[in-house]
Amino acid sequence: MDVDVCVFLWNGENYVGKEKDLISSLRSNGINCLLFSSNAIDYYLSPEGRKDLIDFISALDSAGIKFEILLSRNDWIFPENRRHLFYILDLYRDFLETFGKDIPVNLDIEPHAIEGQRDFIDPDIWNLYIETLTQVRNRVNYLNPLISYVYRYYGFDEDVVPLSDTLVVMLYITDLSRIEENVVYYREITAKLGKGLRIAFSVEKDLTGGESFYKESKGNLKEVLKIAENSGADGIVLQDYENLMSYLTAN
């Protein structure tokens, strides 16, 4: 089975209109899926900016690289802040009608990162998170929630997985035996409901060795891909493009 090899692209506006070098870099490193985040996503989804984004996506598509949207902001969990999220999703739905092709939304909202929640997620915060996911689910055709592996202690299997098309588990560890254990665990849960599974890893330079593969060998990262494939996962996601390029150069 072939698995997707995806990468986060933050500040994607820096690459729109300059995609030739990006595509060459992605293809030469075996990456076939781009999770695109932009501080200007409102503009690119609007009537004024959508042509640039359509040209960008079409160039990726011609190169065999999947394009997916990545939306990330933790305070969208609160009802008073969701208006902006829903505004983006409304633009997104209108954009899809113009583009004529559906694109998954990867939603990165981290309730454990809300102030005061790191050691224990308050049930009220968790409920707000599930409420947000549910409302987004009603607005998009393909939803891929990003979750931390610590959510396994908060009923994610009953609350988050049913709302997902593909679950993206941010497994920021480098120990291969622990990675295999976790991939098998999440694959069993998602497979029961017929959901997809991707596992996200970090190659960030500023994280510790136990969290990021930045100081690990390329061989270890290739072993992760084998583990994902052998365990039936649908893909891996690497955090993020700029750090990955630095990692590949340094190693």
Image (spheres, rainbow, N blue to C red):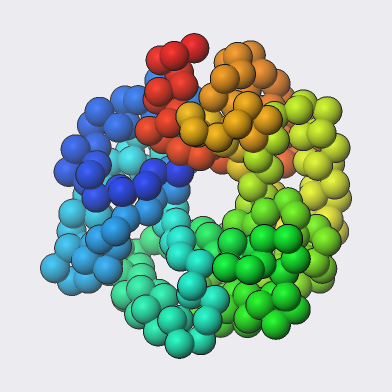
Q: Where is residue 209 in the image (x, y as percent from the top left)?
A: 63, 27
48 sits to left or right of 12: left
User: Dividing the picture into quarters, in which one does residue 242 lie?
Assistant: top left
Decide if residue 4 is in sight here: no
Q: Position of residue 176 (x, y in %)?
A: 77, 26
Q: Which of 154 and 197 is in front in this view?
A: 154
- Against 232, residue 148 (above or below) is below
Q: Position of residue 143 (x, y in %)?
A: 56, 65
135 sits to left or right of 56: right
Q: How many labels does the image show?
A: 0
User: Dividing the picture into quarters, in which one does residue 158 lie?
Assistant: bottom right
Please identify the residue farthest to the front as the structure is shown.
Answer: 116
Q: Which of 115 and 138 is in front in this view?
A: 115
User: Dividing the picture into quarters, in which one does residue 154 lie?
Assistant: bottom right
Q: Nearer the viewer, residue 61 or 237?
A: 237
Decide if residue 215 is in sight here: yes
- Against 158, residue 220 (above or below) is above
Q: Residue at x 77, y 34 (%)?
A: 179
Q: Residue at x 23, y 31 (%)?
A: 20
Please identify the residue farthest to the left as the structure is shown.
Answer: 48
Q: Which residue is drawn at 80% across and 58% down?
A: 152
Q: Where is residue 220 in the image (x, y as percent from the top left)?
A: 66, 18
Q: Which residue is drawn at 14% across and 68% down?
A: 48
User: Where is the N terminus found, in terms of image quarters?
Assistant: top right
149 sits to left or right of 93: right
Q: Which of 124 and 217 is in front in this view?
A: 124
13 sits to left or right of 90: left
